[in-house]
Image (spheres, helix red, strand yellow):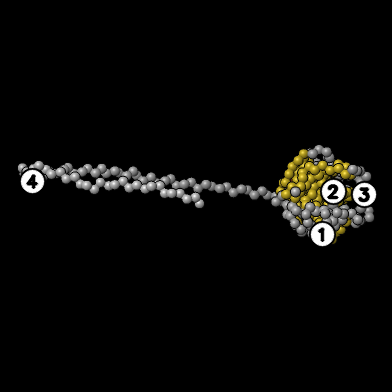
Amino acid sequence: MKRLIPFVLILSLAQAACSMPLPFFVEPTATATEIVLPSSTPTLANPTDTPTAPPSETPTETPPPSETPEPSETPTITPTATPLPFDPSASYGTPSLRDNMDDNRNWASGSGLPDDQYLRLALGSGHLSVTGKQVGWDTWWFTASAPSDFFIEMHVNSGNCSGQQAYGLILRGPQSAGDSGRGYIYSFACDGSYRLDRLDSTAPYTKVELVPWTQSDYIHDGANQDNVLGVEMVGSEIVLYANGFELDSIEDSRYSGGRFGLFVNAGAAGNYTYSIDQLSYWNLR
């Protein structure tokens, strides 16, 4: 464990058959004509009385009226409504804190921003860069703010990442720097997945996986991609967002309040840097 001022903890973590034709028979057709010779030739009494047969009555069938098929009904397809991203400002108004990363007021300790063998924070051009240096280590840095019920969102560029190098937030952490590390870690990985863990102890290092790594189309995967992490915590309910779209919702009542901070895991490559454009939270209590 590495303790930084105001508070930083860094810890290590570590699927052809042939067929014969049937005989063909032709039934003989009778061609003989039977001739019957009359014994005498009949004499007609009146030549004009030529017997005539009544006209043959050929039945005429009246065809049924043509039935014109009913026109087929064309199904009406109702387009699926595309969900709109959630806008916390429209729901909650002005944020309690909005940090555009123009200065270090929310992140520096008495000796400035951290830069050691584990973690580096650096400001420049309206961005706060966060670098995790150690391979596979979870590293975080807390602010002084300690809301209980809140909505928080962070605008991030993923940087030159790969695999499961991860960036995110730690929430409801310890109230002060002297307390043992704990809190909820919500992170995105470079591969477009998200995860939620609950950190219970740093000695020994103990985490509970509340939501395992899960792929989402709402997360822009790959290097140098912009994403917005959002979390709402009210009481025991935790709702996770990506770019304004809800991903998951769970209940966990272990921690009810505390400080929030930045999180990074450098993955198997180490020395991973992402940058933050803006961070805001709305105090809902």
Say which label, 3 or 2, has the lower sequence index: 3
Which element carries disc 2, helix, strand or loop?
loop
Residue 274 in view, yes or no = yes
The kind of residue tagged 3 is Arg
**Cα–Cα gap, marks 3 and 2:** 20 Å
| Label 1 environment density (alpha carbons within 10 Å; few <14, some 14–19, many ≥20) | some
Q: Nearer the viewer, mark 4 or mark 1?
A: 4
Q: Nearer the viewer, residue 256 or 106?
A: 256
The kind of residue tagged 2 is Ala
Q: Identify the residue position indicated by label 4 in the image.
A: 48
Which element carries disc 3, helix, strand or loop?
loop
Q: Identify the residue position indicated by label 3 in the image.
A: 3
Look at the numbered discs 3 and 2 and tell me whether their residues touch, using CB distance below 8 Å: no
Q: Identify the residue position indicated by label 2 in the image.
A: 14
Look at the numbered discs 3 and 1 and tell me whether their residues touch, using CB distance below 8 Å: no
**Cα–Cα gap, marks 4 and 1:** 126 Å
Residue 221 image point, x, y percent? 74, 55
* 26 to the left or right of 155: left
* 112 to the left or right of 40: right
